[in-house]
Image (cartoon, rainbow, N blue to C red):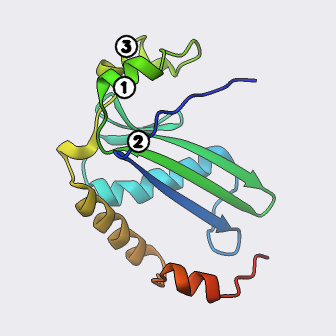
Amino acid sequence: MTVSRVFVDEDTLFVTFIFSKKSLDITFFPEPILRWAEKFYKKVFEIENFKLIENDFIIDDKKIAGNAMYIKKDRFLLHTSFLLDFDINKLKKYLKIPKSAPAYRKNRSHKEFLSPIKNIFSKDLFISKIKQALQKSFVVKHLNILDIKKAKIEYS
């Protein structure tokens, strides 16, 4: 079993999609799910050099986000961790260069391999762009935590 370590702090932004087969017309396997997410996030970034390589989102040849997913029969969860910013000293302290790494990493250090998205978007603008892309693709209902606690949500 391969164990991956992820460094998370206040400059990490998480976006998680949970879909059932009824709500998204793609094959529920890793590659089609990641390709769907790549198309979605291309609407957010609106730049040519944004793309999916292996399981990561990159700009140019630098990683800006990693993905994890869970697939079960007729539903999936795709969890993306975006690097809004990072402290290279914390990364050096807590993360080693993994023995098993994507080929495109090319044995580069964290500083040479990773790129924050703060150079493109502020946190608020990035969140706003994600919301806009969601509203263009789906019917979006805004809920606060009290609405969620009151709602009866059926999972089928």
Crowd tier of the residue under label 3, counting other residues whose Cα lies within 10 Å: few below 14, some 14–19, many 20 or above: few
Q: Secondary structure at mark 2?
A: loop
Residue 153: image location, x then y, percent: 70, 82
Q: Name the residue at 63% across, 89% down.
A: 150
Q: Residue furthest left?
A: 119
Callout 3, which amino acid? Arg
- Res 58 → quadrant: top left
Q: Which residue is mark 3?
A: 108
Q: Name the residue at 36% across, 71% down.
A: 131
Q: Secondary structure at mark 1?
A: helix
Instruction: Please tell me whether residue 11 is drawn above or below residue 122 in the rendered image.
Output: above
Q: Name the residue at 21% across, 54% down.
A: 122
Q: Mark 3 against mark 1, which lies toward the viewer? A: 1
What number is the disc on residue 90? Answer: 1
Callout 1, which amino acid? Lys
Q: CA distance from mark 2 to mark 3?
A: 22 Å
Q: Mark 2 against mark 3, which lies toward the viewer? A: 2
Residue 73: image location, x then y, percent: 81, 59
Q: CA distance from mark 3 to mark 1?
A: 17 Å
Is 58 displayed left or right of 154 in the figure?
left
Tell me which label, 2 or 3, sits earlier in the chain. 2
Residue 96: image location, x then y, percent: 48, 15
- Residue contact at pointers 2 and 1, CB within 8 angstroms: yes
